[in-house]
Amino acid sequence: MTVHKAKTWLFIGWACAVAPLMIILVMRQLGGEYGNDAQDVWNWFSQFVLPTLTLLIGAFTVSAAPADHKPLDHPMLFWIAAVLSLFYIGLLYVVVGKQVFTTLTYQEYFKQTALFLSLIQAVVIGVVGKFFIESGR
């Protein structure tokens, strides 16, 4: 697999995986589940999706580097980034799916999930960032 292909897979994978999550939240908001104040929901979404997505967009849209057409030097790093990304995105879906079954207010629920999601997100961003740095060499 080439560097460009790996970057493409990570970017498209993330974009395709978080789009339905966003649609779910939009549908819930339009259905009135979050009342007149959905700010906490969108703060949560932007806090846990946009940092990694913008890293991927930035790294993917940077002009082609000579290293893009060579084979991956560290394929294991790509696979670790991909698996961690899948785990993290899956966890986001679990959090959103379980929210309808909790007795907590949606504000408190999303606040509580932020405690562990931020730790996992830091690892994901670190590994994805390392992959892009290593693949650009």
Image (tube, rainbow, N blue to C red):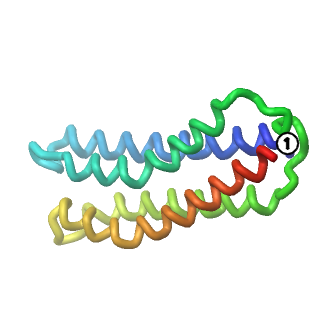
Give the residue furthest to the top.
63
Identify the element where label 1 is drawn: loop
Tell me what residue is drawn at x 27 percent, y 70 percent: 112
Q: Above or below — where is 119 with respect to 67?
A: below
| In front of the other: 36 or 121 | 121
Number of numbered callouts drawn: 1
Q: Amino acid at mark 1?
A: Thr
Tell me what residue is drawn at x 84 percent, y 39 percent: 67
| In front of the other: 67 or 84 | 67
Near mark 1 (Cα within 10 A), the count class, few <14, some 14-19 or many ≥20, is: some
Tell me what residue is drawn at x 63 percent, y 30 percent: 61
Q: Is residue 41 left or right of residue 63?
A: left
Q: Is residue 55 left or right of residue 36?
A: right
Q: Above or below — where is 55 with respect to 115?
A: above
Give the residue furthest to the front.
137
> Where is residue 93, by image quadrant?
bottom left
Give the residue furthest to the right.
70
Q: Which residue is mark 1?
A: 2
Give the residue furthest to the left.
36
> Where is residue 75, by image quadrant?
bottom right
The percent position of residue 98, horizontal first and vertical second, equals 33, 65
The percent position of residue 80, horizontal first and vertical second, equals 70, 63
Tell me what residue is drawn at x 64 percent, y 61 percent: 127
The percent position of residue 104, horizontal first and vertical second, equals 17, 70
| In front of the other: 93 or 114 | 114
